[in-house]
Image: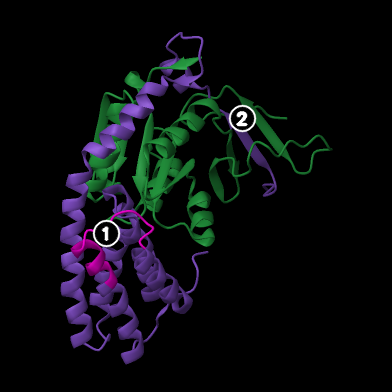
Chain colours: A green, B purple
Amino acid sequence: MGYNLSKLRVLIVDDSKNMRMLVKTILNALGVQTVREATDGQTALQELRGGPIDVVIVDWVMEPMDGLEFVRQVRTAEDSPNTFLPIIMMTGHTERNRIFKARDSGVTEFLAKPITAKTLLLRLTNIIENPRPFVRAKDYFGPDRRRRSEDYSGPERRGTNRAEGAATKDPKPVQA
Amino acid sequence: MTDDTKVQIFNPPNRLKSAVDDGRPGKGIDPNLLAKAEKAMEDVKPQVEAHMKNEVAWLSELMAKVTASGGQDRAILEEMYRTAFELKGQGTSAGYGMLTRFGDSLCRYIEAQQNMGAKEVAIVKAHADSIAAIMGRAIKGDSNPIGLAIAAELEKVVGRPT
């Protein structure tokens, strides 16, 4: 199928005005018409409560609330507007340990700076075409941290309940 | 007693896919839009470059303070890290790929230093001077031979990116 991104509603969260301008420029050229902006995690949460957003593109280092805390709040806060919201973390921190840390906070995709139109489009396309299941474990709630290519056909290795088509803020999983 | 090994998996419906489906038989977005986005990035390069110039000037001011304090003022070093991180993240978008490389190297070096002495300050200064020269001489791209040679020497000290 072909895509028309004009109906996509995107929130850019970055303390750098210049970076927000760059991302907005790319999104507008790709056809996205609704682009909202916030300068840190706290104002981003307020923006999310102000109206529906389909995708968030968030920087890591910001004050007073950084990108990691923002992701945790979206995923786990009682009053989160959408715990399943796709979140792209846009960061210059590309070291493995930092990527694991961000992944464990519930980030959906990474976008390494410096960004290009192509890399941003690839991340958006991946979110649209290959949405990951969400996982709730003892100390984690967020997108499945395993890549989909890990097809496994052997016996079940751990206790798992599945919930298909869950749509509400806190859907109840189907008991196995 | 709860079972801590239990994992629940949810498959939220893919609303995005239906929201962006334009009914065309092709796959993905119109390729002309990607070309349009790349052109739009080119068009805003002067704005990004102006911002980079300000950041480079600020880095030089910070360097003078680092030298004056002998590298002992952690707050100044943290501000220098932030500035170098900005150069790393946006240098290439402004057309200055070498700013991204030197900015990355400077960030990693500052982060790795617990204490700074004269030798460490000299290495920080070598980064700051190189960055100032790249912008001052408008050395665009990421393949200037002198820039590459200096970057390679500095990265021997700092270590390769992981």
Left or right, residue A141 beside residue B116: right
- The structure residue drawn at horizontal position 37% and vertical position 53%, both measured from the top left corner, is A60
Q: Is residue B135 magenta?
A: yes
Q: What secondary structure is found at the residue carrying circle 1? A: loop
Q: Residues within 10 Å of mark 2 (few under 14, many from 20)?
A: some
Judging from the image, what secondary structure is the residue with disc 2 in?
A: loop
**B20 or B106, which is in the foreground?**
B106
Q: Residue at x 36, y 75 (%)?
A: B110
Q: Is residue A64 above or below residue B66?
A: above
Pair 2/1: label in front: 1
Residue at mark 1: B139
Q: Position of residue B140 (x, y in %)?
A: 29, 55
- The location of residue A145, given as percent across then percent down, is 59, 44
Name the amino acid type tagged 1. Ile
Q: Is residue B30 magenta?
A: no
Q: Residue B93 in the image: x percent, y percent?
A: 30, 48
| Residue B146, position as x, y percentages in the image | 35, 69
**In-front residue for pair B66/B53:** B53
In the picture provided, is A160 more to the left or to the right than B84? right
Q: What residue do we see at 37% from left, 86% from top?
A: B115
Q: Tell me, yes or no, whether the two marked residues, 2 and 1, touch with CB atoms within 8 Å.
A: no
Relative vertical location of residue B19 with respect to residue A61 in this rendering, above or below: above
Query: Which residues lie in the magenta part?
Result: B130-144
Identify residue type, mark 2. Answer: Pro
Numbered tag placed on residue A173 in the rendering = 2
Can residue A77 be seen? no
On what subunit does the disc labeled 2 rest?
A: A
* Residue B148, visible in the rendered structure: yes
At 39% from the left edge and 52% from the top edge, which residue is drawn? Answer: A91
- Mark 1 nearby-residue class (10 Å; few <14, some 14–19, many ≥20): some
Chain letter of disc 1 in the image: B
Q: Is residue A69 above or below residue A152?
A: below
